[in-house]
Image (tube, coloured by chain):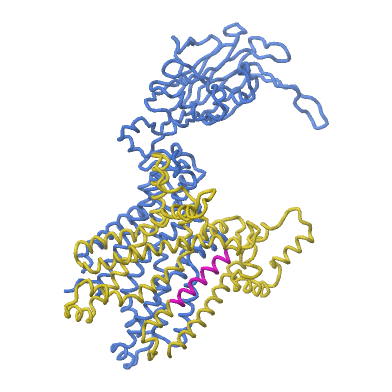
Amino acid sequence: MGLRAYILKRVVIAIVTLWVAATLIFFLFVVHPGDPTRFLMDPYLTKEQEEMLRRELGVDEDLHIQYLKYMKNLLTFGLVPPYFGVSFQSRRYVASEMAWRLPLTVGLLSLALTGYIIVGIPVGILASAKRGTKVDMGIMTCGLFTYGVPTFFVQLLAVFFFIGYMYSTLGVKLFPSSGWVDYPPPQGIAFIANVAWHYALPVLTLVVSNFAGWALYTRNMMLDSLTQDYILTARAKGLGERTVLMKHALKSIYPPIVTLITLSIPGVVSGAIITEQIFGLQGIGQWYIRSISLQNPDYPVVQAILFISSTLTVACNLIADFIYGIVDPRIRVGTRR
Amino acid sequence: MEFSHNKIGLAGLGMLIFFLAVGIFSDVIAPYSIKDLSAESPWQADRYALPDWVTIFPAFQDLPPQQKHKTDWTHSHSGYIGTVKQDLPDSVNYTKTAGMLTVYYNASKSGSHDPVTVYFNASFNYPYAPMQRFLLRFTWSASPDQVVQTLIDTPWGLKPWGPATGSMEYMIKIDLIIPNGTSYPIWDQNWWKYKEAFVRIPPPAFWNTNSTAPIDLWSTFGELAEKLGFKYTDVYLVPAVLFSTKGPYTLQLGITMRPGTMDGAEVPLENATGRVSVSCGDFIVWGRRFGLLGTDYYAHDVFSQLVHGSKISIIIGVTAAATATLLGLLVGVTAGYLGGWTDETLMRMVDVLICLPILPVLLVFVAIFGYNVYYLIIIIAIFGWQGLSRVIRSQALSLREMAFVESAIASGARRSYTIWRHIVPNVLPTALTAMVLAVPGAIILEAAVSFIGMGDPYAPTWGKILYHAQDTGAFTPAILGWWVVIPPGLAITFLCLAFVFIGHAIDEVVNPRLRRRR
């Protein structure tokens, strides 16, 4: 099949997948009961103005026309009008609000991901190197334990302890109560430091409760590759254990690790929802909850966020496939069915 | 089996059996039923009451438990209570049946027009720190034997004109007498009028008609605070000051009666008769400690909620995971074995469904259609089986090439026979591990939905306890309700851990790579 054909096939599949996902999202909201435009309706509007508003929002049109408009809206990714639509709550373009909310969530995710890589992977390698010893058992149990504890419980405990107890009772302010920056925000370098301080506790709790999954995965992969024959050869050649580990075994698990990283990115929306709710960060997740728990849910916002999430998933899967295609020669050359 | 050698697996199994037992016997273990725990149900103790066992710490020794003192109005025929002489006047007679005290007034017996007051007492001992709220609950009714109401002829028929008058005028009041003898007038039948008096308490006002009213006197009424001389907003000072000493407290019921005035003239003594009834209600001290795990903001027992939630979590988790695994198994085997177009279509479907994140889509369903536990299970099943289907598909693919399958086909086996008898049993271990490991995910998903506030409004799930905790200030320094935050979280943790341990043990058994090298 060859590399080019493989990539082409993957891209086409990705585009079609995204389109089907967007259609599913569309039909999710078509079946809603109630009037979604009640938010934008002013009780003092005259009948003609109401009609004009409805025409503009397009709620009374035929289904296929609504669908086409919706598709155009989403697939332009908010870069051209109608900019993902108008939010019912804030009566502004969804894209403009997304412009300052998305970086908050992306920042949270990037920091957490860095944490997983820096903490989880070395721990996994260590556990695999010292397999069977107390260190391994200890890490495994610890890992299984934190794997079972739900992330939001760890976060609630952290909020309870650091903010409720230490700050309010003892007066020790280790971490700020909520939000992503103080108000009024300081300028320059202090701004970055302030944001980092606000993000410290969320990222810390995320890493503590999730690094175990990464460690276990890395450990399993390393154990797999450590039983291969070339490791035996390397040891027989007299290479030091560290070289064997780092240069040979680790290199063989790069593709799965990179795939793991790539496939963790789409979890940003789901994961951020709870974290942002608990810590009061105004990112995508908290915006989503706010938009959806209203009496009349804010459909443009919800649709936009779901679409962004789908795009992210599709894109990341595509990238993961590319990496596999490039790294694994069997795919490049083409396997027989 | 090897499973029994695995300590982690056994630990997991033990925890799971514990939770199952709690769930099965929840109606027996939990002191309160699910109906008692709904938002409109009556209080079980004070809001955010601590657990009962905190009294082992010296700082909490004096916390008042939940108490219900029956106000059994008794009359002592001689002596004084406070400064009040306790004789029974001639014109007054009383009877007390179970739960109801009735006082009969007959002015002719004493031959005087003066008002007479008779006092009844109900005492209880209070050796604790002051409570935060109390509730005095009783019913009173009064009926002069004759009541006259002038009627006037109006186009709408006969209508009352002017106030009604009766043969007896009465006034009822209740004082609280604290151990050092001070008496606080906590209630009289005119008590709600005190809000209107800016400068001074209005003079006592007698009533002279038939009346009856049930009384729920909460200590948090602003009118009570004002009546006792506090600020309208200082409602928590009322019990703090009143009950600041430990000792015997007395509720003193005073009923004052005198001949009424009818038609402008005072009623002759023979006609000045009537009766007043006061029920032997309850003086409820809302306990600041209660139960095994205290109460939440809605004053409901947390331990009961925890026990009932166990049942719900296990059912939802296992059902959702089982359905998802079943779907994944079916799709994976079909796609892997049949191959070709079926394979392609199914895998594309899987790709699409992976795109949409579970939690947001679930929230959309709940927002539009309302919460329904079946939605949860269905959506987890639809969106949660993709990973498994891929793994099973690849396993089916490799199994298809194996010799025993080829020989089965060669000897003429039908496709369904091959699938059921050869492929499926070989992918079952993977599926089983995946199912056990999927249960924690389902449980946490359900808890997350409840935690956001979009869960079942009637079921006491663990996530809902945390949601109410966050919503009603358990994290604020004033309350720091650790007994509402930590138990549900620990429960979720250990239930998930149980499945993770069991799953890990199963994984080690069926997956040869992870076993020790022999």
For the residue pair B371 and B236, the one nearer the viewer reads as B236
The chain coloured yellow carries which letter? A
Residue B86 percent across, percent down from the top left: 47, 11
Left or right side of A77 for B304: left
Is residue B109 placed above or below A179 in the rendered structure? above
Left or right side of A327 for B160: right
Question: Quarter of the image containing the C terminus of chain A?
Answer: bottom left
In which image quadrant can residue B227 be found? top right
Residue A30 percent across, percent down from the top left: 62, 68
Left or right side of B474 for A68: right
Is residue B109 placed above or below A118 in the rendered structure? above
Is residue A310 placed above or below B336 in the rendered structure? above
In which image quadrant can residue A167 be found? top left
Q: For residue A312: magenta?
A: yes
Residue A34 percent across, percent down from the top left: 65, 60
Q: Report the residue at 68% width, 58% height from top.
A: A40
For the residue pair B129 and B370, the one nearer the viewer reads as B129
What are the residue bounds of the magenta stretch?
A302-319
Is residue A253 visible in the rendered structure shown here?
yes
Is residue B302 placed above or below B456 in the rendered structure? above
Q: For residue A304: magenta?
A: yes
Is residue B277 visible in the rendered structure shown here?
no
Question: Quarter of the image containing the N terminus of chain A?
Answer: bottom left
Extreme residue toward the top, this view = B111
**What shade has chain B been given?**
blue
Extreme residue toward the right, this view = B155
Q: Report the residue at 34% width, 61% height from top.
A: A147
Residue B107 percent across, percent down from the top left: 60, 10
Magenta-colored segment: predominant secondary structure: helix
For the residue pair B330 and B208, the one nearer the viewer reads as B330
Number of numbered discs on residues = 0
